[in-house]
Image: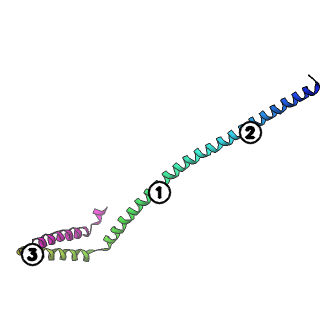
Amino acid sequence: MTAIQICALIVLTLLVSLTYWAGYRGGLIDGRIEGIDEGKAIQQSDNSGTIQDLKQSLDQAQAHRKQLYSHYERALAASKLGEPARQTLLEIAEKLRIAAETFSAFRTGKKLERDSLALRDRALTIADLLKPVALEDAA
C-alpha cells in the first residue's frame, strides 16, 4: 500500500466516523425533542381533562345557583303577599264552595262542581301557605 492510499484510508475512515457521529447526535437530539413534545402532549391532555372536569363542575354550580335563585324569587314573591292576599283567597274559596253547591243542583253541572271544588282546594292550600308564621316556629 502506498502512502497516498494509507492517507486516503485514514481520511475515508475519519469521514465515515464523522458521518456516523453526526447521525448519532442528530438522532439523539431528534429523540429528545420528540420525547419532550410527547411529554408536553401528555401533560396538556391531563390538563385538558382537568379543565373539562372543572368546567363541568362550574356548569353544575351555575345550574344549582339558578335553581336556588328561582327558589329565592318565589319565596320573596310569596313573602310580599300578605294577609290581604290570604283573605282574598279565603273569600274566593268560599265563593267557589257556594258555586259548587249551586252547580250540584243542576244535572249538567257535575263537571263545573268538580272544577269549582278543585279550585277551592287550591285556593285554600295557597291561603295556608300565606298564613303568617310565628317567630318561634320560624326559628
Amino acid on which disc 3 is placed: Phe
Disc 2 or disc 3, which is closer to the eye? 2
Q: Tell which circle, 1 or 2, labels the residue nearer the N-terminal end.
A: 2
Q: Based on the picture, tell me whether residue 74 belongs to the magenta stretch.
A: no
Q: Quadrant of residue 34?
A: top right
- Taking depth in this image into account, of 14 and 68 the one nearest to the observer is 14
Residue labelled with disc 1: 58
| 34 relative to 138 in the view: left or right | right
At label 2, counting other C-alpha atoms closer than 10 Å, the crowd grade (few under 14, some 14-19, many 20 or more) is few
Region in magenta: 110-138
Q: x, y (%) of residue 102?
A: 8, 76
Q: CA distance from mark 1 to mark 2?
A: 47 Å
Q: CA distance from mark 2 to mark 3?
A: 99 Å
Q: Tell which circle, 1 or 3, labels the residue nearer the N-terminal end.
A: 1
Residue labelled with disc 3: 103
Which residue is drawn at the image coordinates 15% and 75% (left, top)?
Answer: 96
